[in-house]
């Protein structure tokens, strides 16, 4: 049975457009699409880490959590990693991906606000259960 060696925490950013359609914010690093996430610093709680990573990776600071502080974990992947995701409602907007102090460049190569169909195509298999959960929890 695989053991968890690394944990990361993130938000699934969801915006509602003028037509009431849900849009999801995805970030791309190299060929991999994901939601904003990263490891906890010090004694951060999972939610504190998810919020900090969201702000660091997107530059966005305002969001709401109308679905509560519920989260879902991925299955174990890539040598013992597990990511936990929370749901956040944000306003769709242009981003300028911030420069990472550690890397000297943005951590991600691209971002996209995408609808359900495009998100289902872009997200890797390990995130499909997270995406299905996000869609089911956020249905009105």
Image (cartoon, helix red, strand yellow):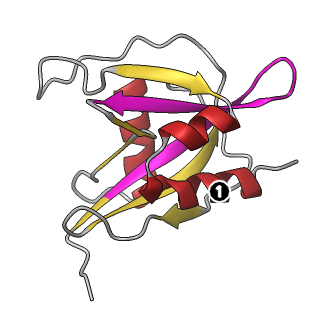
**Image quadrant assignment for residue 32:** top left
Q: Which segment is the magenta one?
A: 8-29
Front residue of 5/62: it is 5
**x, y percent for residue 61:** 50, 26
Residue lying at 36% horizontally and 30% vertically, measured from the top left? 28
Residue under the point 42% across and 38% down:
36
Q: Secondary structure at mark 1?
A: helix
Left or right of 54? Residue 80 is left
Residue 59 appears in the picture as rendered: no
Seen in the image, is 33 located left or right of residue 65? left
Magenta region's main secondary structure? strand
Total residue callouts = 1
Going 48% across and 43% down the picture, which residue do you hit? 123
Q: Which one is nearer the viewer's eye here, 58 or 29? A: 29
Task: Tell me residue 38's x, y (percent).
Answer: 31, 46
- Residue 92, how many percent across, how many down? 64, 19
Residue wearing tag 1: 132
Give the camera-side residue of 91 and 126: 126
Residue 97 is drawn in which quadrant? Answer: top left
> Residue 116 in magenta?
no
Quadrant containing the N terminus is bottom left
For the view shown, which residue lies furthest in the bottom direction?
Answer: 1
């Amino acid at each position: 049975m695989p053991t968890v060696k690394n944990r990361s925490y993130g938000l699934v950013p969801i915006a509602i457009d003028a037509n009431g359609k849900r849009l999801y914010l995805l970030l791309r690093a190299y060929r991999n699409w994901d939601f904003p996430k990263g490891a906890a610093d010090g004694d951060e709680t999972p939610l504190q880490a998810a919020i900090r990573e969201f702000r660091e990776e997107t530059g966005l600071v305002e969001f709401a959590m109308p679905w509560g502080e519920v989260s879902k974990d991925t299955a174990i992947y890539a040598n013992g990693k597990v990511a936990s995701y929370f749901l956040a409602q944000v306003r769709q907007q242009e981003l300028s991906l911030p420069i990472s102090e550690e890397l000297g460049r943005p951590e991600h190569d691209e971002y996209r606000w995408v609808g359900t169909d495009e998100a289902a195509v872009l997200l890797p298999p390990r995130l499909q259960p997270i995406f299905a959960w996000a869609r089911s929890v956020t249905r009105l």
